Image: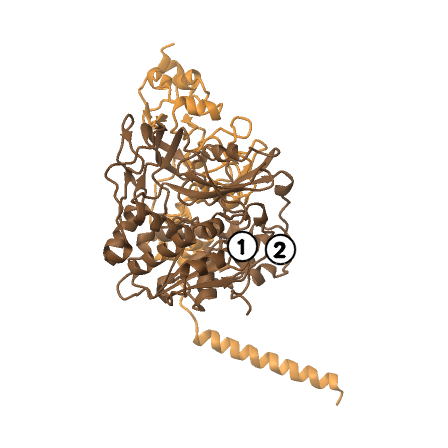
Chain colours: A brown, B orange
């Protein structure tokens, strides 16, 4: 049977062979962590500690502010050095708590395991999601509990776990599924109970055969659960694409997965939830793939949140040569960073070091009307026209052509033979349209 | 006589005459009553359709003026309103101070540092969205020329040093650049180079010094030395109150970063310094 997929998309060079066979190594806790209060989408958390305080491992140091927000927890025990603004790779400035490690890893005494999910009510599970500090670990970092509190009149019938990992180079989810398949499945069952869903699907691209095998074994014939093998294609792991491929449902334009009764979570989010239920330890660490041709020894590392990316690179032997670009996340959507002190946050899935030769750019030229961007756009948009409208500042026309349906996967820019920065132009125009909407109320 | 050429001449002339008659009748029947004054005012407006007035183009404003929805002085780009006022049968005070757009930043490529190499779309908005801008200073001019592109009168050009230069003769103070700049560096100030602090940085002194040679470091020397107390320090940035400023030029002389610039009024220098 041909694996399921969607229309459009691209086949970039995957580069996963560099790390997909390497087991997850635990990186020792660093001397110092920087924990931004805005590690998730939505309102930043409010710091609960001040400089000079002593904090324990897993202690809540930032309280969620508002509904679309999650708390932040200390990822080491030690002394708070400062509470002040730091800049994040995406350009935002967030208040962050800097903690100096005392090397004891003293667990916060008030933490206790919530226990078996089957004994807990769905309401309680949804509260626990928030208490665990869960925010989508695929990259967008959307607070998980918000997805499980659907608006009036909408129901969740299926939870899809996203194990597609379509971003080239990244293998953190892959390794997690191979090594901790049980945990992923337990997390999925807990999420299904929280949302009242009767079906759970783990969607994995077929290039991860060992992960599919491990998950099928962990499911152990549960009739409610299944593993959906999907075609290896970018952006297979994008929310709307994965729903289309795994379930055949189409999320309407401008709609959310909940409109078709689905919630999509990353496999790492599910595993973190299972962890929290079993141990009471909130989200304080995650698996990060450090890879690329510019790094000496690519690895999959389990690191504490707040660890500077410099430490991760050191653990991998440092740069193999003068780096061209250091990207946080995958090569298709991750932003390049300009210094190595940025901390690992909840949504940091990888650190990719590209060599100078790999990032050699080119001059952007005029559109030659080849239509390749139209062919690959998974959302059936017309990136050529959208970019042109964006360039002209013709926001009304861009909106009429459905610019807001663009999810910035970057396929159009990837295939453009004229090297036009299509996605970047579109993103710019989207920002302007959103700003205009906010202005007019 | 039966030559096809003759026939076709008659047929075509016939069609032409017939269409002409229909068009004349149609223009009489479907005539739209236009306010003659609106057309007249539209002719007096600059015709650049810059949108600075907030109406859809010059025609839109002309209609609004005639309808009484907009004052005769609504067009920010017109220099002399007397002609429009005459059409409307009112009188206006002649404009005494003409305003022009001015960039409140001196940090071009030579004076400032960059945090990283930017390779994205050459547009200030896009650059600002990429990690808050590539420039060391998060308040200063990005120099990608979005204002120059946006200016409907072609009054802004980019210098070699990467700063926009306003041609005061062409500038009509329509305000498009003020709204375009993602860092809000343009302001509409009176023509003739008034004494102004040409910096918008609210960063602390040492941070400014690290990234810019000509930024305001908030040292307060100008505040202390101003003979008429026209300068105040807000958020590490000196601000001159134009109402109080006498253009004596003391601050220009004292500023250690040479951030304050402007034309000094000679008479007032003597008056203020008591020399």
Q: Earlier in the sequence, mark 2 or mark 1?
A: 2
**Left or right: B101 with respect to A51?**
right
In the rendering, at what x and y percent does residue A401 appear?
Answer: 48, 62
Query: In the image, residue B88 lies at what x, y percent?
Result: 36, 53
Locate residue B128, reporting x and y percent.
Answer: 46, 40
Q: Nearer the viewer, residue A174 or A238?
A: A174
Q: Quadrant of the C terminus of chain B?
A: top left
Q: Are marks 2 and 1 in contact (CB under 8 Å)?
A: yes
Picture quarter with the N terminus of chain B: bottom right
**What element does badge 1 sit on?**
helix
Name the chain letter of the residue that bears numbered label 1: A
Q: Where does residue A403 sit, x and y in percent of width and height? A: 47, 58
Q: Which residue, given by chain and number where applicable, does mark 1 sit on?
A: A387
Q: Mark 2 = which residue?
A: A367
Furthest-top residue in view?
B275
In the depicted structure, whether residue B44 falls above or below residue A189: above
């Amino acid at each position: 049977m041909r694996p399921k997929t969607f229309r459009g998309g691209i086949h970039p060079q995957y580069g996963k062979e560099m790390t997909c066979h390497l087991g997850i190594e635990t990186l020792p806790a660093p001397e110092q962590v920087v924990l931004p209060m805005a590690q998730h989408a939505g309102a930043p958390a409010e710091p609960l500690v001040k400089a000079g305080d002593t904090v324990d491992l897993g202690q809540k140091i930032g309280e969620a502010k508002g509904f679309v927000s999650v708390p932040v927890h200390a990822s080491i025990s030690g002394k708070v050095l400062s509470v002040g603004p730091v800049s994040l790779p995406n350009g935002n400035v967030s208040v962050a708590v800097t903690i100096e490690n005392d090397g004891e890893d003293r667990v916060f005494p008030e933490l206790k395991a919530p226990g078996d999910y089957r004994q807990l009510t769905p309401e309680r599970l949804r509260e626990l999601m928030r208490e665990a500090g869960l925010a989508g670990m695929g990259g967008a970092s959307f607070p998980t509990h918000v997805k499980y509190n659907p608006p009036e009149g909408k129901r969740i019938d299926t939870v899809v776990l996203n194990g597609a990992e379509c971003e080239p180079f990244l293998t953190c989810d892959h390794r997690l599924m191979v090594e901790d398949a049980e945990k992923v499945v337990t997390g999925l069952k807990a999420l299904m109970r929280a949302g009242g869903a009767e079906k759970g699907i783990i969607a994995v691209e077929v290039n991860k055969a060992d992960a599919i095998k491990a998950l099928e074994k962990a499911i152990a014939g549960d009739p409610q659960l299944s593993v959906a093998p999907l075609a290896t294609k970018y952006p297979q792991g994008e929310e709307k694409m994965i729903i289309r491929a795994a379930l055949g449902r189409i999320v309407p334009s401008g709609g959310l997965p909940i409109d078709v009764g689905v919630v999509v979570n990353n496999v790492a989010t599910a595993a973190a939830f299972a962890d929290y239920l079993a141990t009471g330890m909130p989200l304080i660490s995650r698996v990060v793939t450090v890879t690329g041709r510019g790094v000496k020894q690519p690895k999959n590392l389990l690191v504490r949140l707040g660890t500077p990316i410099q430490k991760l690179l050191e653990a991998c032997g440092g740069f193999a040569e003068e780096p061209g670009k250091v990207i946080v996340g995958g090569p298709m959507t991750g932003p390049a960073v300009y210094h190595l002190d940025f901390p690992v946050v909840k949504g940091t899935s990888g650190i990719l070091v590209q060599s100078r030769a790999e990032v050699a750019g080119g001059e952007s030229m005029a559109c030659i009307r080849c239509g390749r961007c139209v062919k690959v756009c998974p959302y059936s948009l017309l990136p050529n026209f959208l970019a042109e409208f964006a360039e002209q500042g013709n926001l009304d026309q861009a909106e009429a052509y459905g610019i807001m349906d663009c999810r910035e996967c970057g396929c159009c820019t990837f295939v453009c033979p004229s090297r036009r920065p299509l996605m970047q132009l579109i993103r710019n125009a989207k920002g302007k349209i959103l700003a205009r909407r906010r202005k007019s109320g | 006589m039966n030559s096809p050429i003759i026939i076709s001449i008659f047929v075509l002339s016939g069609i032409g005459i017939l269409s002409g008659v229909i068009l004349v009748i149609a223009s009489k029947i479907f005539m739209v009553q236009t306010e003659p004054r609106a057309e007249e005012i539209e002719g007096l407006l600059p015709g650049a359709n810059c949108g600075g007035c907030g109406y859809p183009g010059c025609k839109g404003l002309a209609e609004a003026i005639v309808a009484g929805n907009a004052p005769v002085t609504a067009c920010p780009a017109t220099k002399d309103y007397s002609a429009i006022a005459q059409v409307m049968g009112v009188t206006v005070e002649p404009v005494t101070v003409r305003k022009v757009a001015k960039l409140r930043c001196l940090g071009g490529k030579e004076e400032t540092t960059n945090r990283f190499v930017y390779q994205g779309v050459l547009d200030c908005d896009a650059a600002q969205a990429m990690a808050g801008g590539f420039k060391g200073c998060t308040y200063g001019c990005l120099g990608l020329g979005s204002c120059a592109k946006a200016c409907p009168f072609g009054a802004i050009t980019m210098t070699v040093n990467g700063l926009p230069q306003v041609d005061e003769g062409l500038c009509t103070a329509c305000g498009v650049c003020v709204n375009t700049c993602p860092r809000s560096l343009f302001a509409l100030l009176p023509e003739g180079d008034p004494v102004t602090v040409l910096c918008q940085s609210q960063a602390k002194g040492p941070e400014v010094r690290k990234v810019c040679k000509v930024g305001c470091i908030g040292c307060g020397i100008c505040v202390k030395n101003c003979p008429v107390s026209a300068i105040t320090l807000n958020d590490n940035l000196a601000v001159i109150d134009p109402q109080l400023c006498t253009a004596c030029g003391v601050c220009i002389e004292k500023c250690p970063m040479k951030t304050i610039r402007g034309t000094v009024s000679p008479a007032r220098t003597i008056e203020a310094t008591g020399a």
